[in-house]
Image (tube, rainbow, N blue to C red):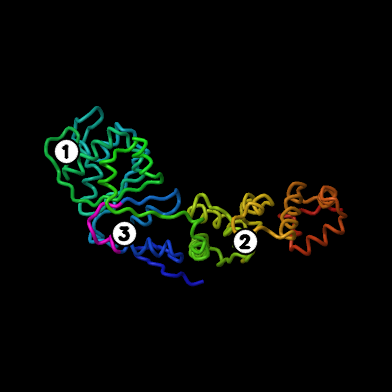
Amino acid sequence: MTLVNAETMHNLTIIAVSTDSHDLLDRAQRVAPTEANLLISGETGTGKDLLARWIHEHSARKDGPYVKIDCGSLPESLLEAELFGYERGAFTGAGTSKPGRFEAAQGGTLVLDEVAGLTLPAQAKLLRVIEERRFTRLGGRQSVTIDARLISLSNVNLFDSVAHKTFRADLFHRLNVIPLEITPLRERPNDIPALVDYFLDNICRRHGKERCELSPDTLSCLRGYDLPGNARELFHILERAVLISREKQLLPNTLPPHLTSSTALMQRKDQKPTLAQLEAVYIREILTLTHGQKSRAAEILGISRKNLYEKMRTYGLPYNRKNQPEDGK
């Protein structure tokens, strides 16, 4: 499959097939050369950091450093030192001077990841630095002028955070000069086949495997799944399938059970399954429940062993000992 509008630079790839993805990439291309602060929002796993890196690589600062700090994982007592650095003796244990992330990003891009995790006092300090475009190391006297572009990332809606007064409105407006929102993968299903193709190339190459392909039923299962973890979850689902499959074609039984169960089929958002699809999945579940014991499975299903074998042949259910062990009867 040919990737549609795949932009690659320094091993960064943005795949845009759906209208939403095309619009986002077009906007990113237009704002990348500017110096404006950006706020990239989207659910976990949608690729916010990837887009931030892509914008950096397409900006006038591409030869400068790309520095990221996770605002949500650091306690407030460490965040200021990480952002602004400190001088020797600034606090107990500060045996040497250390530059902060703002200094490390001079001439490049500073990414504030999960910016919604900042406490209100930390937000006030960051706001002052952004407004003055200068800062002083902890324990220091000499101010340093900021020469870094700011890109903020958030997996929560900062409009709601401002409304609930957990995020400062003035800081929000400073960071949100240009908003870029990545829609969830479930809302752009046309991107899924292209992402699958790209991910399988990388996964098979990484693990030294022959190139695999999804069967039509497997792709259908993926397209019907909500993918709450977005592209990141899709990658790990495919990696699991590649590693456990013995065939070049990845069948539905290589997917996690919660994607292929009868309940999952009934909850599909695209279309309801046929009776045959439900029967095939249910028989597979019963065989798994009975550890492949055909007599016991037939008893639960209310059919004869001969009828069970016929249905297994009809639906292409595996007979091998690893997937559906024989019961020796």
Magenta span: chief secondary structure: loop
Query: Is 318 above or below relative to 174?
Result: below
Hey, what amino acid is under mark 2?
Answer: Thr
**Discs 1/2, front:** 2
**Marking on residue 55:** 3
Label 1: state its secondary structure: strand
Label 3: state its secondary structure: helix
Question: Total label count?
Answer: 3
User: How far apart, in angstroms, are the residues tagged by discs 1 and 2?
Assistant: 56 Å
Q: Is residue 54 left or right of residue 223?
A: left
Q: Position of residue 270 (x, y in %)?
A: 60, 59
Hey, what amino acid is under mark 1?
Answer: Thr
Q: Nearer the viewer, residue 232 or 158?
A: 158
Q: Position of residue 109 (x, y in %)?
A: 26, 53
Quarter residue 133 falls in:
top left
| Label 1, residues with CA under 10 Å away: few <14, some 14-19, many ≥20 | some
Magenta region? 30-38
Marks 1 and 2, the one that precedes in the sequence:
1
User: Where does label 1 land, which residue?
Assistant: 136
Query: Is 132 above or below relative to 88?
Result: below
Residue most toward the bottom? 2
Label 2: state its secondary structure: helix
Q: Position of residue 314 (x, y in %)?
A: 78, 64
User: How far apart, in angstroms, are the residues tagged by discs 3 and 2?
Assistant: 34 Å
| Label 3, residues with CA under 10 Å away: few <14, some 14-19, many ≥20 | many
**Marking on residue 218:** 2
